[in-house]
Amino acid sequence: MSSIKDRLLSPEVRPHLVEDCCGLIDQSVKSTKGLKGIAVKGAYSTVKAIKPRFVEGVVDALLDEWIDKLVLFENEHAAKKLSTPLTSYIIAEKARVAEALVAVTDARAETTKHKTAAGFYRRLRPSALEHVEQTIPDLAALVTKYAAG
């Protein structure tokens, strides 16, 4: 059986996964409430206005590293010989999964040439972990959708 990395990053799946991940990001931004929501929505719309395909480009650029992080959880799941599906394990470990995924984004924000986007990210970073963690069940659904087999 191939790993989730092989299935999720296959040329047939990758563009659809990128599109769906962007949809998750859009939904997360739209659902943010209060003053924090105003800041998040403002920064997001500014970045998208400056470079409309920026989010898709970033997701595609980071996808391999994010999937590498998910593979670590796939390996843990296999080592523990759990009878539950991998996606259930990802959801159960959502705090750790979110930290692993955000660590990838943190590292990229430190080295990006997109200074405006990096500045927005640094200002919004304190809430990023919470947003990603809330999105883990939806991410797990994408894993099921594209990596089942």
Image: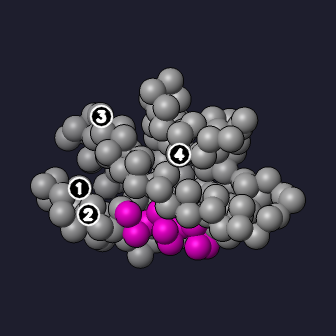
Residue 21 at x, y = what percent? 50, 42
Q: Nearer the viewer, residue 107 or 77?
A: 77
Residue 81 at x, y = what percent? 80, 65
Q: For the point 18% across and 58% down, which residue is it?
A: 112
Dot 3: few (<14), some (14–19), or many (≥20) neighbours within 10 Å?
few
Dot 4: few (<14), some (14–19), or many (≥20) neighbours within 10 Å?
some
Q: Which residue is mark 4?
A: 5
Instruction: Name the disc covering residue 109, or none.
Output: 2
Disc 2 is placed on an element classified as: helix
Q: Nearer the viewer, mark 2 or mark 3?
A: 2
Q: Nearer the viewer, residue 109 or 2?
A: 2
Q: Is residue 78 above or below residue 145?
A: below
Span colored in magenta: 95-104
Which amino acid is tagged 3? Arg
Q: CA distance from mark 3 to mark 4?
A: 24 Å
Q: Nearer the viewer, residue 97 or 130?
A: 97
Q: Are marks 1 and 2 in contact (CB under 8 Å)?
A: yes
N-term-proximal mark, 3 vs 1: 3
Whether residue 103 appears in magenta in the rendering, the answer is yes
Q: Nearer the viewer, residue 114 or 120?
A: 114
**Residue 8 in sight from this viewpoint:** yes
In the picture, the quarter occupied by the N terminus is: top right
Q: CA distance from mark 1 to mark 2?
A: 8 Å
Q: CA distance from mark 1 to mark 4?
A: 28 Å
Q: Which residue is mark 3?
A: 53
Residue 102 at x, y = what percent? 43, 66
Which amino acid is tagged 4? Lys
**Residue 132 in sight from this viewpoint:** no
Q: CA distance from mark 2 to mark 3?
A: 17 Å
